[in-house]
Image (cartoon, rainbow, N blue to C red):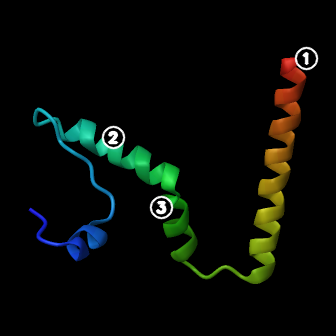
C-alpha cells in the first residue's frame, strides 16, 4: 500500500481488477487512456513532425470538427 502522499502522486492512472477480470480492467484502462489523449500524444512523439505539417494537420482537424458540427445541426432540424 501507499505510505505517503508522494507515492500517490507518482502512481498515475489506476484501474481496479474485480473478480479476476483482467480483460475487463484492460478495456477500462484503454478507454481511460483514449479519453485522456495518451495514445494521440504517444503517436505524436514517435517521430518528428515539422511545424508546417502540424499546422496542416490542425487545420484539417478543425475542418472535420466544423463539418461534424454542421452535419449535427442539419440532423436536429
Left or right: 35 in relation to 70: left
Q: Which residue is mark 3?
A: 38
- Residue found 81% across the figure and 79% down from its top: 52
- C-alpha separation, residue under disc 3 versus residue under disc 2: 15 Å
Classify mark 3: helix, strand or loop: helix
The picture places residue 13, in percent across and down from the top left corner, at 33, 58
Residue contact at pointers 1 and 2, CB within 8 angstroms: no
- Residue found 13% across the figure and 66% down from its top: 2
Seen in the picture, residue 58 relative to 4 is either above or below; the reply is: above
- Residue found 42% across the figure and 44% down from its top: 31
Q: Quadrant of residue 7?
A: bottom left
Q: Which residue is mark 1?
A: 77
- C-alpha separation, residue under disc 3 versus residue under disc 1: 36 Å
Q: Quadrant of residue 23?
A: top left
Classify mark 1: helix, strand or loop: loop
Q: Which residue is mark 2?
A: 27
Q: Nearer the viewer, mark 3 or mark 1?
A: 1
Quadrant occupied by the C terminus: top right
The picture places residue 59, in percent across and down from the top left corner, at 84, 62
Classify mark 2: helix, strand or loop: helix
* Label 2, residues with CA under 10 Å away: few <14, some 14-19, many ≥20: few
- Residue found 28% across the figure and 54% down from its top: 14
Amino acid at each position: 500500500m501507499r505510505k505517503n502522499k508522494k507515492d500517490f502522486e507518482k502512481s498515475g492512472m489506476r484501474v481496479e481488477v474485480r473478480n479476476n477480470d483482467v480483460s475487463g480492467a484492460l478495456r477500462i484502462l484503454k478507454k481511460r487512456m483514449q479519453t485522456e489523449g495518451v495514445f494521440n500524444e504517444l503517436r505524436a512523439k514517435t517521430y518528428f513532425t515539422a511545424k508546417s505539417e502540424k499546422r496542416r494537420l490542425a487545420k484539417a482537424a478543425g475542418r472535420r470538427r466544423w463539418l461534424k458540427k454542421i452535419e449535427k445541426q442539419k440532423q436536429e432540424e
